[in-house]
Image (cartoon, rainbow, N blue to C red):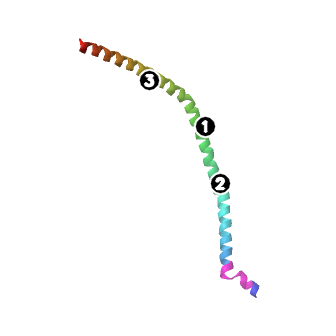
């Protein structure tokens, strides 16, 4: 009788409930959560590849635009310097 009483005591019932809950959680995690996470990772990989291709196309365009702007800035600096010199000459006269 004591052995049957051990299985139905409050402590053993709590332990069994905890074990059942853990097994249920592991089942849900295995069959629902992990595939969802894998799907999300695959989507991120696809987006990464698309972004990489886009940047491979755009970076050379951006680079050439920046080089053009750098050349224009240099020319403007030269023009401003020559303008300063001509103004200083006129002021001295």
Residue 74 at what x, y percent from top left?
42, 20
Residue at the image point whose x is 44% and y is 23% from the top: 69
Residue 89 at what x, y percent from top left?
28, 13
Query: Which residue is the site of mark 3?
Result: 69
Badge 1 vs badge 3, beta-carbon distance below 8 Å:
no
54 inside magenta stretch = no
Q: Horizontally, is 91 left or right of 42 in the view?
A: left
**Label 3 crowding class (10 Å Cα cut-off): few <14, some 14-19, many 20+?**
few
Mark 2–mark 1 distance (CA, rounded to whole Å): 23 Å
Most foreground residue, 4 or 60: 60
* Sequence-wise first label, 2 or 1: 2
Residue at the image point whose x is 45% and y is 20% from the top: 71
Mark 2–mark 3 distance (CA, rounded to whole Å): 50 Å
* Sequence-wise first label, 1 or 3: 1
Label 2: which secondary element: helix
Mark 1–mark 3 distance (CA, rounded to whole Å): 30 Å
Query: Which residue is the site of mark 2?
Result: 34
Label 3: which secondary element: helix
Q: Nearer the viewer, mark 2 or mark 3?
A: 3
Q: Residue furthest front?
A: 92
Q: Quadrant of the N terminus?
A: bottom right
The magenta region covers 4-12
């Amino acid at each position: 009788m004591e052995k049957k009483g051990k299985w139905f005591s409050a402590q053993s019932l709590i332990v069994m409930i905890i074990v059942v809950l853990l097994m249920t959680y592991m089942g849900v995690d295995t069959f629902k959560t992990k595939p969802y996470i894998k799907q999300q990772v695959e989507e991120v990989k696809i987006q990464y590849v698309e972004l990489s291709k886009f940047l491979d196309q755009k970076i050379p365009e951006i680079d050439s635009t920046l080089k053009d702007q750098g050349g224009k800035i240099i020319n403007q600096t030269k023009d401003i310097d020559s303008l300063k010199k001509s103004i200083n000459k006129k002021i001295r006269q």
